[in-house]
Amino acid sequence: MFEWSDKFSINIRTIDTQHQQIFALLNELSICCQSNNVSPTVVEKALIQIKAYSNKHFVDSTPKCNPRYHAASCTVSAKNTAWGVL
């Protein structure tokens, strides 16, 4: 299971909330995969949800966190660049 911790917080409430939702979706997928009777359709649905939410997250946060759209001093932007996210 993926547990949210304050160490993951970037101190931007909307983005932290989105990150927490991604954790929740990953946990749903984990639970599905641990089932002895898991259906490929259920796993596919969970993966589609994760992909859709992640895409929404990056579209919503890009103007706030991408150095192309925000000041280079943005700490979130620097972390995303260092992690290869953007």
Image (tube, rainbow, N blue to C red):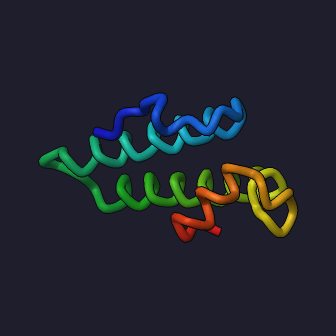
Q: Image point 85% across, 58% down: which residue?
A: 70
Vertical arrangement, residue 61 with respect to residue 69, above or below: above
Residue 73 occupies which quadrant of the picture?
bottom right
Up-down relation of residue 54 to residue 27 (above or below): below
Question: 36 or 8: which is nearer to us?
Answer: 8
- Please tell me in which quadrant of the rendered image residue 12 appears: top right
Q: Quadrant of the N terminus?
A: top left
Residue 52 in the image: above or below residue 68: above
Residue nearest the observer in this picture, 41 or 60: 60
Q: Residue at x 46, y 35 (%)?
A: 7
Q: Residue 33: give x, y in percent of width and height.
A: 24, 51
Which residue: 65% across, 69% down?
A: 86
Whole-percent x, y for residue 31 in the image: 27, 41
Q: How far across and down, in percent of the image, does residue 78 sit?
A: 65, 59
Q: Quadrant of residue 27?
A: top left
What residue is at 37 percent from the left and 53 percent from the top? Answer: 42
- The residue lying furthest to the front in this view is 73
Residue at the far left: name it.
Answer: 36
- Nearer the observer, 55 or 61: 61
Q: Nearer the viewer, residue 65 or 20?
A: 65
- Number of numbered discs: 0
